[in-house]
Amino acid sequence: MTKRIPIGAMMSLTLRYLPMLALVGLLAACSASSSASQEPTSSRSASVAPSQTQETPSASASAEPSQAVPGQAEPSFPAISAGEPWIVTQPKETKHLLLIRPDGTDPVEIATHLPPEQLHPDWSPDGSQLAFEHTPEGWAADVRDVWISDANADHARPLVTKYPANLERLWWANPAWSPDGTAIAMIGYKGNASTGLPARSVIVIVEVATGDISVVADVAQTSGQLNSFPRWSPDGKALVGTFDRFDGEELTGTAIAVFRKTDTGWSTPTVITPFDDFASRPDWHRSKDLIVFSTNEENDKPSNLYTIRPDGTELTPVTTFGPGGDRPSQPTWTPDGRIIFTYTRATDGKKRPAFINADGSGLEVVNGPENLNLEHSRLRPIP
């Protein structure tokens, strides 16, 4: 049994809500004690100096959606051209988002004009925008918001300028763009998700153009359940997420669950994996009925990646790491049908983005800046 530690800065230790990344350093060659379907290859590495965060006036949630936040210093980041491949990732050490090439080169730290920290980035389907978690300066410690920006985090703004009363003062997290780019699914927690177990979790969908909000699922922790990490089906008619089970405040299992759109709203979740498997962080393939997820991110058992059909059939291992081996986590599908995930080396806990094919072949670890640990990586779509 694993004691539930809050959700907030997304750590690798608990319920995936908002992990706090781990340890510093460069990912070296794959540990001999771990195994996958092939030895990983490594790309080149570089380094980036953590920036000095610029002092800015408090960001206001009432900023106009079409403008940069009033009083915010005008950023000057390198242009990120259309059609350029980039990985957006989340370093622990700088607490600002980082762009790197798929081979780990050309690191560009972005969003440095905003107060740290920025977490859980996600690309829009056309690769022109980012969504990410952000805590504006001066906000209370028990709230967080989702912001959107262009590809280099210029002109960042809050996704929602005014929440309805029943959704105010929540810890908003895990933004996920819809397949058509018109909406973002996200989760809100009641209470500071980095210092305590949330009392409530709410999955909502926000229309990007208007800020209109619809609720998918709203559960209280006293029910013995919480939701996390919503991701879209290719047709936009379903969501997949993690369903967390509790006995009091003790996390006793996590499972993959599917929510489907109905004529009257959204269905109750259909659980498609056993809670005892501690399955979590699912993502739905961009064009197929195929879901990828990781296991045992909240305990010391071997962690591996699997694929499964939305009806719970055809469970298939992608990796086969054993006890004490390297650990894969936080998988998402890439636009070309591979899987990008966080690869943690067993010997020292160092973290890097990595790619693998759905059949377990082609494991490639991306050696990004040597002084940073990188998690929650997403490969930019190139239309």
Image: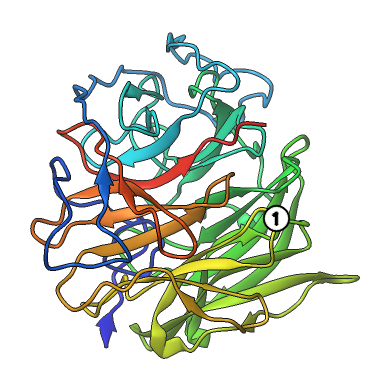
Residue 171 in sight from this viewpoint: no
State the quadrant of the N terminus: bottom left
Closer to us: 297 or 210: 297
The answer to whether residue 373 is above or below residue 157 is: below
Going by the picture, which residue comes out furthest to the right?
A: 263
Where is 182 relative to 274, above or below? above
Is residue 178 placed above or below 262 in the rendered structure? above
Task: Using the rendered image of the protein, determine whether residue 159 is visible from the camera's viewpoint.
Answer: yes
| Residue 254 at x, y percent in the picture | 44, 80
Q: Position of residue 120 (x, y in %)?
A: 44, 46
Task: Name, please, the residue furthest toward the left.
Answer: 347
Q: Residues within 10 Å of mark 1 (few under 14, many from 20)?
A: few
Secondary structure of the residue carrying tag 1 is loop
What is the quadrant of the C terminus in the image? top right
Q: Residue at x 56, y 49 (%)?
A: 175
Give percent across and percent down for residue 81.
55, 16
Residue shown at the point (43%, 35%) measured from the top left: 87
Q: Name the residue carrying label 1.
A: 287
Residue pictured at 33% horizontal, 48% vertical: 364
